[in-house]
Image (cartoon, rainbow, N blue to C red):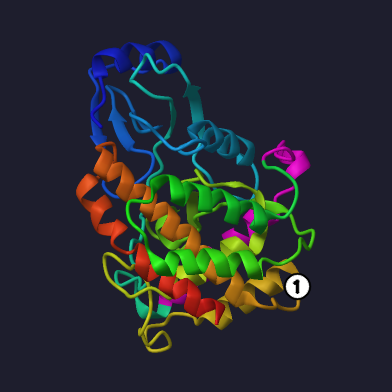
C-alpha cells in the first residue's frame, strides 16, 4: 500500500502545481480505498486510490467518488473540494484522485466521549441535518440524474450484494444464507422514492469542525448512488445497535439519556420532520438490509486480507469475524 513518490511527485507537479520533496502518510482506519496525506513544500493534499491487485467487479469506484463530490460542491452537502482524477494505472499502479485536506475532527465512537454531555445532542442533530441535505439534493441541477440505475433500489442492492458476498465467501455462514433468503422474500415494492444516497452514512464518515458541531465534509462516497433514502437512515440506526467499543462502534446498552445522546426514535422522528414525511412503516426491513450489506462488505474485507491486498490486513481479518454477528442481527431486525 506504499506510494511510489518517484512517479507520483512529477505527476503532482504537472497536474496540480505542487512542489516536492513529498512525504506520504497513510491514514489509519478504513478498509476499502487507501487514503494518504501528501505533504509537499507549500501545501498538503489528500490522495485516495483503488487498492492494487485483483478486485471485485464495480468495487472501489474512485471515479464515482470523485464525480459525486465534484457535483455536490456549492450545495447544502459539505464535501471536500476535489482537484483531479487519474485513471492511468501507470502512475502508482491503480486509479486515484486528489482532494483538499480538510481540517477538523472525526469521531470513531458515537458515544462522543470527548464532547461535553450538554453538547452531544447538537452533534447528532447536525448529523441528521446533513443526512436530510443529502436526500434533498436536486439531482438534475447537480448533474446526478444518471448517477444510478432506475427501478427497485432494494431489489437491486440485495441482488448486487448477494453476488459480491458469494464472490468473496470463504466459508458457509448459515445465518447469512438465512438472511439473504429472508430479505429476498420481504423486499418491498418500489415506492418511487429516489434520492442521492451515501451508502455508508455514519458518524465516523463525517469531518466536524474543530470547535463547533458543524460538519465540514462528508467522507467516503464509494457506495453512493441513486436509491432509496431509508437505506441511509437505517444505516445510522444499524450502527447504533452494535455494541460499543473499537470494533462495534455502536450504542447497544448505553444509557443514552444519561449520556446526552438521542434515541433511535428521536433521530428517526427528526429525520421524518425534515423530509416532510409522517413516519416509516416496516423499518425493521431497512435495518436488516443494512446489516446484510455491511456483512457482505466485511466479508469482502476479509477476503482481500486473505488475498494480501487489504488496506489493513490484520484489522480486515478481525472485522471479517463479525460477519455472522451482522447476519444474526439482521435476522433479529426482521423479526
Relative to 92, does residue 271 appear above or below in the rendering? below
Position of 241 compared to 321: left or right? right
Q: Does the magenta stretch include residue 132?
A: yes
Q: Residue at x 56, y 39 (%)?
A: 69
State the image coordinates of residue 327 (x, y, percent, origin top left).
Answer: 43, 68
Position of 152 compared to 328: left or right? right
Magenta residues, as a range? 119-147
- In terms of depth relative to the viewer, which is nearer, 161 or 24? 161
- In terms of depth relative to the viewer, which is nearer, 326 or 243? 326
Position of 330 compared to 170: left or right? right
For mark 1, what is the residue? 277
Indicate the quadrant where residue 171 lies: bottom left
Q: Name the dominant secondary structure of the magenta segment.
A: helix
Count of numbered marks: 1
Is residue 314 among what the camera can see?
A: yes
Secondary-structure class at tag 1: loop
Q: Does the magenta stretch include residue 80?
A: no
Q: Residue at x 78, y 41 (%)?
A: 140
Image quadrant occupied by the N terminus: top left
Q: Which residue is drawn at 67% across and 42% down?
A: 148
Position of 44 compared to 281: left or right? left
Relative to 28, does residue 215 appear above or below in the rendering? below
Q: Residue at x 37, y 72 (%)?
A: 250
State the image coordinates of residue 158 (x, y, percent, origin top left).
Answer: 58, 56
Amino acid at each position: 500500500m506504499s506510494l511510489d513518490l518517484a512517479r507520483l511527485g512529477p505527476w503532482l507537479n504537472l497536474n496540480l502545481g505542487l512542489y516536492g520533496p513529498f512525504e506520504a502518510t497513510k491514514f489509519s482506519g478504513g478498509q476499502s480505498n487507501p487514503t494518504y496525506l501528501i505533504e509537499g513544500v507549500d501545501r498538503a493534499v489528500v490522495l485516495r486510490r483503488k487498492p492494487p491487485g485483483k478486485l471485485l467487479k464495480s468495487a472501489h469506484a474512485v471515479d464515482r467518488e470523485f464525480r459525486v463530490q465534484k457535483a455536490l460542491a456549492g450545495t447544502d452537502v459539505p464535501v471536500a473540494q476535489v482537484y483531479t482524477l487519474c485513471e492511468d494505472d501507470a502512475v502508482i499502479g491503480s486509479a486515484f484522485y486528489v482532494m483538499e485536506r480538510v481540517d477538523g475532527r472525526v469521531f470513531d465512537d458515537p458515544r462522543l466521549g470527548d464532547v461535553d454531555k450538554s453538547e452531544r445532542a447538537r452533534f447528532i442533530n447536525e448529523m441528521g441535518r446533513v443526512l436530510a441535505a443529502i436526500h434533498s439534493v436536486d439531482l438534475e441541477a447537480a448533474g446526478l440524474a444518471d448517477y444510478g440505475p432506475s427501478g427497485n433500489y432494494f431489489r437491486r442492492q440485495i441482488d448486487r450484494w448477494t453476488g459480491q458476498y458469494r464472490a468473496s465467501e470463504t466459508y458457509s455462514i448459515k445465518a447469512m444464507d438465512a438472511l439473504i433468503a429472508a430479505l429476498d422474500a420481504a423486499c418491498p415494492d418500489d415506492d418511487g422514492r429516489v434520492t442521492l444516497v451515501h451508502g455508508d452514512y455514519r458518524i465516523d464518515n463525517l469531518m466536524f469542525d474543530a470547535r463547533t458541531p458543524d460538519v465540514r465534509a462528508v467522507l467516503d462516497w464509494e457506495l453512493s448512488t441513486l436509491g432509496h433514502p431509508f437505506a441511509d437512515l437505517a444505516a445510522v440506526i444499524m450502527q447504533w445497535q452494535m455494541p460499543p467499543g473499537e470494533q462495534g462502534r455502536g450504542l447497544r446498552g448505553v444509557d443514552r439519556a444519561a449520556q446526552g445522546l438521542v434515541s433511535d426514535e428521536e433521530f428517526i422522528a427528526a429525520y421524518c420532520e425534515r423530509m416532510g414525511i409522517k413516519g416509516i412503516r416496516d423499518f425493521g426491513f431497512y435495518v436488516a438490509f443494512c446489516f446484510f450489506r455491511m456483512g457482505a462488505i466485511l466479508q469482502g474485507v476479509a477476503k482481500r486480507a486473505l488475498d494480501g491486498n487489504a488496506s489493513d490486513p490484520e484489522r480486515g481479518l478481525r472485522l471479517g469475524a463479525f460477519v455472522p454477528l451482522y447476519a444474526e442481527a439482521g435476522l433479529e431486525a426482521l423479526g
